[in-house]
Image: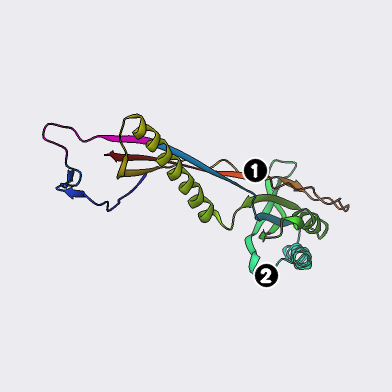
Amino acid sequence: MRRFGLKSVGVILWAGAWALSPLWASEPGKDVRTVTVQGNGGIDAVPDIAHLSAEVSEDGPQLEAVAASVRAKIGRVLEALRAQGIPDKDIQTQVFNIQPKWENDRRGNVTRVGFIVSNGIAVKAEDLKKVGKILTAVADAGATRVRGPDFSFSRRQELERQALKLAMEDAKAKASLLAQAADASLGPALTIDEIRTGLPPSPVMARAFAASGASAAEEPIAAGQQSFPASVRITYFLK
C-alpha cells in the first residue's frame, strides 16, 4: 500500500498527528466530520509485445562436431528471425551450455559417451501479426525447442496511471454522493491510500513445442487483452 501526502489548504501535520487550522477547525465541542470511501477503476488493453525463446540442442560423441552443428543451426535460426524483420537489438543469447553425456554400460559402470551442446536465444517481437510466422520460421530453421509467446505492454506505466485516475474519480463521486446525503459538501482530501492489487496472468499462457523435421503450418496466435485494475481509499473532510 502506498500513501500520497497532499498539501491541502488548512491541513497541518504537527508532531506526527493531524491538526486543523482555523479554516477547518470545528466549533467548540463539535467533532470534525470526514467520509472515507474506496474507489475502483480499470483499463482493458491489448498487449503489443511478444516474448519467445528458441533453442538448438544436440548430442554426439565428438564435441567439435556437435558444437559445429549447433552453431550452424542457431545461425540459421538467427537468419530466419532477421528475415521476419526482428532487429539484432531484440535478439539476445539466453543460454549456451556444454555438458558430458553419460550412459551405463552392461556392467553398470557410468561411462561418458559424448557431449550435449545447447544454444538458446530470447526474442522480442513488436509486430504481433508476425508472431505465428516467427514461431514457424525458427522451427523450420532447425530450432529443437521453441517456447512462448509471453505478452507484455510497452505502455504499462501509462495504463496503470490511467486506471489509477479512474479509481480516484470513482472515489470522489462516491464521497460527493455521501456528503450530499449528510447535508454537507466535500472538502479536501485528508489521506489517500493506493490499494495495490495483483495483475492477472498474461492472457495467453506460455507454450513450448519440440520442432520436427517437417515444415509446420503457421502457428495461430491470439494476444487477447488484459485488465489493469486500480483501487484507492480516500478520506475527505466534510464542510
Q: Considering the image in quadrants, where does the C terminus appear? A: top left
Find the magenta span and give its range: 26-37
Query: Does residue 78 appear left or right of residue 37 in this picture?
Result: right
162 or 77: which is nearer to us? 162
Q: Considering the image in quadrants, where does the N terminus appear? A: top left
Question: Looking at numbered disc 2 in the image, what kind of residue is underneath it?
Answer: Asp
- Where is residue 52 drawn, in percent x and y? 68, 54
- Cα distance, mark 1 to mark 2? 27 Å
Magenta-colored stretch includes residue 35: yes
Q: What residue is shown with label 2?
A: 88
Helix, strand or loop: magenta stretch: loop
Category of crowding for the residue at label 2, using alpha-carbon neighbours closer than 10 angstroms: few (below 14), some (14–19), many (at least 20): few
Magenta-colored stretch includes residue 10: no
174 or 105: which is nearer to us? 174
Residue furthest toward the top? 181
221 or 121: which is nearer to us? 221
SS at circle 1: loop
- Where is residue 203 drawn, in percent x and y? 65, 43
Please name the residue shown 14% across and 36% down the image: 27
SS at circle 2: helix
Q: What residue is shown with label 1?
A: 203
Please name the residue shown 51% across and 55% down the image: 157
Asked whether the viewer can see residue 190, the reply is: no
Query: Does residue 161 appear left or right of residue 86 in this picture?
Result: left
